[in-house]
Image: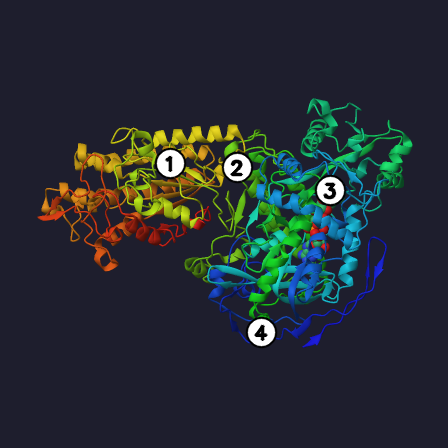
Amino acid sequence: MAASVATGSSNLHSGFNISRRLQGGRQTACANSPTVSFNGWLHKDLSWSQGAFKVLEMPKNCNLSQSAVTRRLSVSSCFGDGVSTKYFDFAVIGSGVAGLRYALEVAKHGTVAVITKAEPHESNTNYAQGGVSAVLCPKDSVESHMQDTIIAGAYLCDEETVRVVCTEGPERIRELIAMGAMFDHGEDGNLHLAREGGHSHRRIVHAADMTGREIERALLQAVINDPNISVFQHHFAIDLLTSQDGPDTICRGVDTLNTETHEVVRFISRVTLLASGGAGHIYPCTTNPLVATGDGMAMAHRAQAVISNMEFVQFHPTALADEGLPIKPKKARENAFLITEAVRGDGGILYNLSMERFMPQYDERAELAPRDVVARGIDDQLKKRNEKYVLLDISHKPRDKILAHFPNIAAECLRHGLDITQQPIPVVPAAHYMCGGVRAGLEGETNVRGLYVAGEVACTGLHGANRLASNSLLEALVFARRAVQPSINHKKSSSLDLSASSCWTCPVVPNALGSDTMNTILGKTKEVRRELQSIMWRYVGIVRSTTMLETALERVGELELQWEKLLFEQGWKQTMVALEACEMRNLFCCAKLVVSSAMARQESRGLHYTIDFPHLEESMRLPTVIFPSPAVNEMDLMKLLLGVFGILVLKMVTDATMVGSHADVWNCKFPAIYNFGDSNSDTGGISAALGEIPPPNGETFFGHPSGRSCDGRLIVDFIAERLKLPYLSAYLDSVGTDFRHGANFATGGSSIRPGGYSPFHLGVQISQFKQFKARTNRLGNQRNLPRAVEFSKALYTFDIGQNDLAYGFQHSSEEDVWKSIPDILSQLAVAVKQLYKEGARFFWVHNTGPLGCLPYSVIYNSDPNNLDGNGCVKSRNDAALEFNRQLEHKLSQLKEQLPYSSFTYVDVYSAKYRLISTAENQGFVDPMEFCCGSYYGYHIDCGKKAVVNGTVYGNPCKDPSRHVSWDGVHYSEAANLWVARRILNGSLSRPPVSVQDACKHV
Ligand SMILES: Cc1cc2nc3c(=O)[nH]c(=O)nc-3n(C[C@H](O)[C@H](O)[C@H](O)COP(=O)(O)OP(=O)(O)OC[C@H]3O[C@@H](n4cnc5c(N)ncnc54)[C@H](O)[C@@H]3O)c2cc1C
């Protein structure tokens, strides 16, 4: 294995040179290899850059999974010339604060490649002005930082993430200082802490107004000095390499294009960190440097990673408007020059071009209103007055103070003929920061194994709907550090497969096209890029509407199609790669992610403002989530191969993306369960309301009377156990109860419709829940009560319906029972919709059990011909099955009507019927033999005997664990456990998800 040799030296923007040392990566030729089978190795993209689709002539499409296609194909791999492969333990994509901080830590555990598309310093980090927020002042507190973050984030932040970041921040700053970062100190020798908008304390660590540059300098210096880290500059990451292990997608590395030598370099790694920053360049005016083209978000999306909250694009209200400068810059800037909000903080006033101060008409805080409010005010002025910029005036302040506070801004403006101590500064809003990105867990993990994310590319839940100033560098530092330990663990558990490189087809540099063709392609790509940016600015900017978003979606789609058509007409092939073209497809992909997320949010929250839904909507206080597209099925594969899509090479710009809301994407993490039901899941409600069920009433498990219609635990208890939550207590039995983990509104005898055995029908249970929620919210974050935000993350379980049928059979004809089913289910739907309105999202719904197999049904059945082979009453079971068929259909209708919901239909009937029909093989006694229990209404008490088909039943049980039925109507703990084991793993659910994953199929 030969070592590759370092390439050149890098000139850092910040004015220092670092000579580069030899890169330590292992290298092997990616030789032309014969056709190989994928054996589970996948390209997750249908784009031209992927070999599988060279073979298939498939279109580029950033949203459509190709897993099913590729799994079945043999493709020719590594046919490109000059492709080399390097092997590293850790591949880090991006050399901003997140990538570098992570690299320095993991380098203690293996070889590291830092891959970066331009000069190493070129990053958003390098341009950060204000600083990094952290609780470093004794008067400040983590709670205060958390509160500021959550308020700025319009209550959409993930509280756990906020706590973690605010708590760990100070240590991360101390580490940076230890690594050589030099921040400003006050006269007392302590760090000088600035205060920025939205922060209630001084907590911004800074290095003048060039904080990012100092952090980048310090980290890069440390990276260069680390013998275990190799920096690959001007290496553009094209796509992640993934393979499939059952349902899991695993990241194995990344393909890159060396944009200086025009060679493709493949990196095979055990662990990959995506730290590729933001996507400001989907807009024409952005503070982000040219590298911020959303490559990471698009790459991750193509690799089946989950993307979240893309609608929240932060526009900085005041970037320098070059067209208002006396001397225009000779060349259009790649990124807008930022006029820090400290100018407004120091008394700067905003005027329109008629020198009318306008901010007071939008917000009483005027220029000091939050960024999004100021940006909207400016946007409104520009649109109303059809002007290109507004003016920010600080000239009324003393000259020396202006120059001392804003030396950088003063110098930049003076360079263009404008003296800010005398004249107002022309400003416009500019795209600044992406709050959304690749969904990350608390350790930077993604749903793609071996792929971690940190920094602006990630969506950790910290920022919610809006970012608090100076929280992004902090987030990058904290998550880069948090991703280290799981990365090391993953590295230990995975091997570097030296033959892996040949498993993916290689991208090809389009040398064959010739320079004229390439010039045409690149020229057109530039135009298309400008056009895309202008669509995004016009229709997906600071103020949005449904019509604007729909227009954007359509126009972006058309533009992409036109562009692809042109490329392919010029001879472009699916496998070809060039920097500009790759960036272009990433920009398209990100633009579409932003638009589809924005369309899904039908409210105005934080940075997303739409005139059609101008207010906050509590039920929408959830992240938007874009899931990987479902795998292409066999039918689709056939269609593709048969060319049904024909010129699809240019079409299929799908948007099969699903946008929904989610508790937590790859770990549902339900904080609570709210249950609605009858005696099958009543954990004490009926006793609390009406008096205790006679003994024995739960002794086997609880050791004291619990008032259940069971000798112990119910299925709902096993759900709680599976979710690692405490067992549910009854709502009414509230004394001393801890409700943080949910509440149970089920009561014995309850039905869905009013009337029947119990007054506590479903409507009553829902209104109890609503009162409970309202009271909980009013009381705030009190001990023993759930947090407001958790109602939307909880699991809502239903086990109800049996009594509607049973009561019907008792009081009406069989025919009437059947006729009543649609009405019963429409009342269930009303209840579900009410819960949805209250914020409920994740529903786990048990169908009704085999009513006809309950001993009491059998006892009261007078027609022996009405019994099936297992001794169950046929007519009752038939009604239950019809009820269940219609229930499943109703749930799928509800799913369509409630866009953010997840419904899991759970076939409890099948489990219970199986238990009854095979009871003796399962270690139970005859299922018709009940014992121990005491049942309201029928008085089939313990010790009493009942006669079924001539057999006497009802003697006290010697061994309760062998009985299916407790009292002739209800299941014993042993039976509930047996059933729970069969239903909670998802094998009897539709879709087939386990209870732990019941949020995952939005
Ligand atoms: C003008 C400005 C001022 C700001 N001020 C502040 C502030 O005061 N405080 C604060 O907290 N935040 C601030 N921010 C935001 C903050 O700087 C960024 O969010 C943060 O630096 C992001 O760090 P990162 O490491 O995630 O990404 P970046 O620093 O952007 O680094 C991304 C890296 O990935 C590389 N890359 C991208 N795509 C590819 C690819 N395809 N292949 C290879 N490499 C790739 C880039 O070249 C770059 O090296 C500011 C941002 C800007 C633009």
Per the rendering, the mark at residue 789 is 2
Is the shortest distance between ligand 1 and the CB of mark 4 under 8 Å? no
**Which residue is drawn at the image coordinates 30% and 41% (left, top)?**
680
Q: Distance between the residues labelled 3 and 2?
A: 28 Å
On-image quarter of the N terminus: bottom right
Q: Name the residue under label 4.
A: 499
Measured in 3D between alpha carbons, the distance from the residue under mark 4 to the one under mark 2, in whole angstroms, is 48 Å
Rendering colour mode = rainbow
Q: Which secondary structure, mark 2?
A: helix
Q: Compare marks 3 and 4 and give the one earlier in the sequence.
A: 3
First of labels 4, 2 by sequence position:
4
Residue 12 falls left or right of residue 84: right
Question: Answer yes or no: do the residues labelled 2 and 1 have beta carbons within 8 Å?
Answer: no
Q: With 569 as the anchor, is 932 left or right in this view?
A: left
Compare marks 2 and 1 and give the one earlier in the sequence.
1
Residue at figure coordinates x 17%, y 43% from the top left = 943
Name the front one of labels 3 and 4: 3
Residue type, label 3? Leu
Q: Residue 730 carries which label?
A: 1
Mark 1 and mark 4 lie on one chain; the one further toward the N terminus is 4
